[in-house]
């Protein structure tokens, strides 16, 4: 067994990506942009995780003095912002960038340069938001930035300026990406790739993009009001001028609740890829899984005020939003049951990816159950703004989103890099995460039920909160160590991982038919799709049945030896020129345009400096025009249209 | 594989045990939301317990199926490709309907409870106006003309109807083990919550909505008392401040006083300053009945020290009247300020600074000396002479005098 693995390792490194910093700065290849998203998002994930460790250290015991009140308030604000906007969303973006064109049989996304622009804007927005730390003025009003606390009257200084402008930059990045993916998925599917044949991850991406396109404009409006208030003295949120202090909350949660589904649906999509592969069974109830995605997304716009049961909306609004919130539990429950149905009667293989996917099913369920508890307004009035809520949404966002994203990373890492991550380290990571996560967040339910409010930098002794907080902090340290194992595994596997081959998992979907990593043009010949699981159709049942219980990489070698692979990984695939495939030209313009736009925001932050704003605006406008007026592929402008 | 599934099974069993044990243990925590001691608390509790039972049931079923599938369907050597099932309409309809039925069983009592608990408060309720400030609570009893801060007195068995208003940002009014439910305190908007306390005790109150730097330090205390004792408390609060120095003592005409409590006034005037326990008959909650967990244990800031001097209340009274203090604090008949807490009977309170510190000479002195160090973000100025940001500045002796004066205001 060891010999086989060693032979394979020596058999030649997978074809890499063209090197050089310049090639990454100018790339418009969705696969490379996906990787840029991946590594940037993981870096921010580590920063957000570090902030969480500081928070937990402060709260280990009563009357913590590890950080000051102001620093603590900055930490919990930045932890939330970082994890939501700079870690989970871009991790999803990394995977939908890398995967969607491969899953639907396309050469790239619809607008490759806009895709690069989205990434650079995200990177610069993330740096902008974190720059507050260096100025000793990180945002401190919570990720929810409730007015009037976030207005300049109650939050003077740069803190919330970084928040307002940083989120505007990130919002632009996200919106550009959503239009790009909606267009890509509608227009660029391979022949035969009907909507109801699309992999569920692509479906979840598709639905998520609509959530973004419809919800981000709302936060943009809310933030623009706040920006005008803070910079130009308007009175949108100034309560002393008669503003309605709930205006912000309604706008924010009208965005904020769909945002929760933006964070969780891609993870649902990933798990819907991983579970069928490692059960060797098609997804149970595919149409219902798709409809439930759409239903969750639609209902997701009608439940926002369940974040506001305590604000005094009156019994009718409370009842309506309570009922809609309960309704949304039904399609969500259906997804859980359909995953169980997929497992049922399968042949389960417990790879790391599968463990994380099962982790999502088990842990998200807990978050879903506590979510239903919040849907009953009178009971929610006891739970809201207590640690019970902190427990609830960490089961949703860590137990759900992050578990799903980890599953996706382990599953797709070999496709992205051509090498497998270590399964042994992966299992250490999984069990450390599973134990650490439950030890951190489960006791928080009890802290909350024992009356501990959220967002407090200190608490008194003898309140019955000390033990649960001890446990949460110890759990957070375990979680942190497990994450370090993951990062080590990820870095190590880039050079030392076992060569994966085209299809290390015996997976059914299109992306596993091509070399790992795929060549720049993706498909040498655009495939014709005839079913939801094209690779399982070509790989006969007998072939699979012959195989003994073997390790994945050995198995992949078997599959390849049977001639299933579309290309031989030991020889580099032919270049685009050899195949006569037109490729988009690399260009620095998206990066320059993004820099120009951010310079404009910096000018606003810097005492509304008109020269800086004009400079940024000029750079953006000139670059943008030059970009728009240059064809994507100089020699083959009509190629995309003719597909 | 066996080891893994056993670990999972164990984890699952452990979770269930922890859940049950946790709910049981929670019930004994001082601020538990379970079994809150009022009609509103019972209504909330009934719903919450129903939710908890359904939650445990769903948890056991779903996690049980998951663990069973993991154990039962793991891959074995030489097993054939599993049957390729794409779905089953009957089963899918079933697992859509069952959750819907469970949710209906939650929805019906939910709606009933919403309309019952948010109905207008019964006639004849005690009216209390709650005003949230960064970071302290003002309580007004408009039926009696009484204003106090951070310590709320309520009679047992009589419905209390709160009107909630904010002076600045959004706060949230929460007494977990008395009311269970909370209600946000929103500027430019009046919110309501009402309940009837059913037992005599001291309770912790919190601000539950993030409201800036010292959100964590925006606590209050609630004392529920038998009706006669509450009446005595009201009567006492309506009197002017107790102080032997006639120059500082209130005149009947002063300020907004609607006093009818002249008898009480007479008895208070003879009271010695800085007496340790409240005099009987003034309705103050009995110190001995305050549980240990309600005595604040916030450490004082390192580096903030105070000389060993003894304050003189009479000197303090004179100094108070000419100090900046009067700009922000009301003492009936002495000063009209409204920015800070009303101090008319501050000596009778058990805590200061939003229930952050116990109300004793030491903490009062340190508070006046450097409130900025004592409570992050507070607008109470620094008074210690020579300290950074000090407004004017008092010597430790002067501060001790003022503290002695304030302590005497029972």
Image: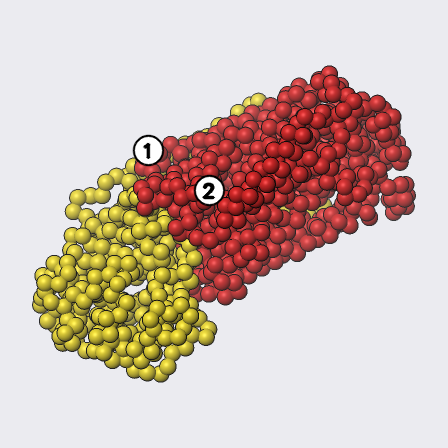
Chain colours: A red, B yellow
Tell me the quadrant of the picture where the C terminus of chain B can be found: bottom left
Question: Residue A227: which numbered mark, if any?
Answer: 2
In the rendering, at what x and y percent does residue A118 appear? 63, 36
Cα–Cα gap, marks 2 and 1: 33 Å
Instruction: Classify residue B180 as left or right of residue A588.
Output: left
Question: Residue A475: which numbered mark, if any?
Answer: none
Q: Which residue is mark 1?
A: A316
The residue located at (15%, 58%) in the rendering is B256
Q: Nearer the viewer, residue B211 or A583?
A: A583
Question: Which tag, 2 or 1, sits closer to the chain's start?
Answer: 2
Instruction: Please rate how many residues cluster around mark 1, counting C-alpha atoms within 10 Å: few if below 14, some from 14 to 19, many from 20.
Output: few
The residue located at (32%, 66%) in the rendering is B352
**Image quadrant in which you'd find residue B69:** top right
The residue located at (52%, 43%) in the rendering is A610
Instruction: Please rate how many residues cluster around mark 2, counting C-alpha atoms within 10 Å: few if below 14, some from 14 to 19, many from 20.
Output: many
Residue B10 can be seen, yes or no: no
Q: Secondary structure at mark 1?
A: helix
In the rendering, at what x and y percent does residue A300 appear? 49, 32
């Amino acid at each position: 067994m060891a010999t086989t693995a060693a032979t394979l390792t020596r058999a030649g490194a997978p074809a890499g990506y063209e090197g050089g910093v310049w090639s990454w700065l100018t790339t418009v290849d969705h696969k490379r942009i996906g990787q840029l998203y991946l590594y940037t998002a993981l870096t921010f994930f580590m920063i957000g995780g570090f902030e969480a460790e500081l928070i937990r250290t402060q709260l280990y015991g009563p009357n913590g003095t590890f950080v000051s009140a102001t620093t603590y308030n900055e930490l919990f604000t930045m932890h939330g912002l970082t994890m939501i906007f700079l870690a989970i969303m871009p991790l999803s973006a990394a995977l939908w960038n890398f995967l969607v064109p491969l899953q639907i049989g396309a050469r790239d996304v619809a607008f490759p340069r806009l895709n690069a622009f989205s990434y650079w804007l995200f990177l610069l927005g993330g740096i902008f938001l974190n720059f507050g730390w260096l100025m000793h003025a990180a945002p401190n009003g919570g990720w929810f930035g409730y007015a009037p606390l976030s207005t300049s009257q109650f939050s003077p200084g740069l803190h919330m300026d970084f928040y307002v402008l940083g989120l505007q930059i990130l919002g632009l990045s996200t919106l550009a990406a959503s239009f790009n993916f909606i267009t890509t998925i509608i227009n660029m599917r391979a022949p035969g790739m009907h909507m109801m044949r699309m992999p569920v991850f692509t479906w979840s991406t598709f639905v998520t993009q609509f959530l973004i396109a419809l919800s981000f404009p709302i936060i943009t409006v809310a933030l623009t009001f706040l920006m005008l208030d803070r910079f130009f003295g308007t009175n949108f949120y100034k309560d002393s001028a008669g503003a309605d202090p709930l205006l912000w909350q309604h706008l924010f949660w009208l965005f904020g609740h769909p945002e929760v589904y933006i964070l969780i649906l891609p993870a649902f999509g990933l798990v819907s890829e991983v579970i069928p592969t490692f059960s060797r069974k098609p997804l149970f109830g595919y149409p219902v899984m798709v409809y439930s995605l759409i239903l969750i997304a639609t209902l997701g716009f009608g439940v926002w005020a369940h974040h506001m049961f305590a604000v005094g909306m009156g019994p009718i609004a409370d009842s309506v939003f309570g009922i809609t919130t309960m309704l949304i539990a039904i399609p969500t429950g259906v997804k859980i049951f359909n995953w169980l149905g997929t497992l049922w009667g399968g042949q389960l293989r417990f790879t790391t990816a599968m463990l994380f996917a099962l982790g999502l099913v088990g842990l998200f369920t807990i978050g879903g159950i506590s979510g239903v508890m919040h849907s009953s307004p009178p009971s929610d009035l006891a739970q809201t703004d207590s640690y019970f809520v902190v427990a609830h949404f960490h089961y949703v966002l860590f137990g759900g989103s992050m578990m799903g994203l980890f599953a996706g990373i382990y599953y797709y890492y070999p496709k992205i890099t051509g090498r497998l991550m270590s399964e042994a380290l992966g299992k250490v990571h999984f069990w450390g995460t599973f134990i650490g996560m439950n030890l951190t967040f489960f006791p928080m339910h009890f802290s909350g039920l024992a009356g501990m409010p959220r967002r407090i930098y200190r608490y008194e002794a003898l309140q019955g909160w000390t033990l649960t907080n001890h446990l949460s902090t110890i759990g957070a340290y375990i979680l942190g160590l497990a994450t370090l194992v993951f990062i080590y595994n990820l870095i190590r596997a880039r050079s030392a991982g076992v060569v994966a081959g085209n299809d290390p998992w015996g997976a059914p979907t299109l992306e596993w038919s091509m070399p790992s990593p795929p060549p720049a043009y993706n498909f040498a010949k655009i495939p014709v799709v005839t079913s939801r699981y094209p690779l399982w159709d070509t790989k006969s049942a007998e072939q699979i049945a012959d195989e003994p219980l073997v390790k994945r990489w050995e198995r992949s070698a078997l599959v390849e030896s049977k001639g299933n692979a579309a290309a031989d990984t030991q020889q580099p695939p032919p270049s685009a020129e050899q195949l006569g495939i037109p490729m988009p030209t690399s260009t620095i313009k998206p990066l320059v345009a993004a820099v120009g736009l951010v310079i404009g925001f910096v000018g606003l932050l810097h005492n509304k400096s008109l020269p800086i704003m004009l400079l940024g605006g000029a750079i953006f406008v000139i670059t943008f025009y030059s970009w728009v007026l240059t064809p994507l592929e100089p020699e083959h402008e009509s190629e995309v249209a003719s597909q | 594989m066996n080891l893994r599934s056993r670990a999972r099974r164990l984890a699952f069993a452990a979770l269930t045990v922890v859940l049950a044990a946790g709910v049981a243990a929670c019930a004994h925590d001082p601020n538990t939301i379970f079994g809150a001691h009022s009609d509103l608390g019972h209504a909330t509790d009934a719903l919450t317990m129903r939710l908890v039972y359904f939650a445990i049931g769903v948890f056991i079923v779903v996690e049980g199926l998951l663990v069973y599938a993991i154990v039962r369907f793991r891959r074995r050597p030489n097993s054939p490709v599993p049957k390729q099932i794409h779905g089953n309409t009957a089963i899918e309809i079933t697992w859509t309907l069952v959750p819907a039925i469970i949710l209906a069983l939650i929805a019906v009592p939910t709606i009933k409870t919403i309309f019952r608990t948010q109905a207008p408060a019964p006639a004849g309720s005690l009216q209390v106006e709650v005003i949230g400030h960064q970071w302290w609570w003002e309580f007004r009893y408009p039926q009696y003309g009484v204003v106090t801060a951070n310590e709320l007195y309520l009679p047992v068995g009589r419905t209390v109807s709160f009107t909630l208003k904010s002076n600045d940002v959004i706060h949230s009014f929460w007494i977990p083990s008395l009311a269970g439910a909370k209600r946000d305190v929103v500027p430019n908007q009046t919110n309501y919550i009402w309940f009837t306390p059913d037992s005599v005790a001291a309770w912790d109150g919190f601000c539950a909505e993030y409201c800036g730097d010292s959100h964590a330090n925006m606590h209050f205390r609630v004392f529920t008392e038998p009706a006669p004792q509450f009446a005595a408390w009201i009567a006492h609060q309506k009197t002017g401040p107790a102080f032997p120095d006639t120059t500082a003592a209130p005149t009947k005409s002063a300020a907004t006083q609607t006093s009818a409590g002249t008898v009480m006034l007479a008895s208070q005037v003879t009271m010695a300053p800085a007496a340790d326990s409240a005099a009987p008959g003034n309705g103050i909650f009995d110190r001995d009945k305050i549980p240990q967990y309600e005595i604040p244990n916030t450490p004082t800031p390192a580096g903030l020290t105070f000389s060993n001097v003894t304050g003189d209340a009479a000197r303090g009274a004179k100094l108070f009247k000419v100090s900046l203090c009067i700009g922000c604090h009301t003492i009936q008949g002495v000063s009209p300020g409204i920015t800070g807490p009303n101090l008319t009977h501050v000596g009778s309170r058990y805590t200061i600074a939003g229930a952050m510190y116990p109300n004793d000479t030491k903490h009062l002195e340190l508070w006046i000396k450097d409130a900025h160090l004592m409570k992050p973000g507070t607008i109470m100025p620094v008074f210690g002479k020579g300290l950074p940001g000090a407004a004017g500045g008092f010597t430790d002796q002067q501060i001790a005098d003022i503290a002695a004066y304030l302590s005497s205001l029972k």
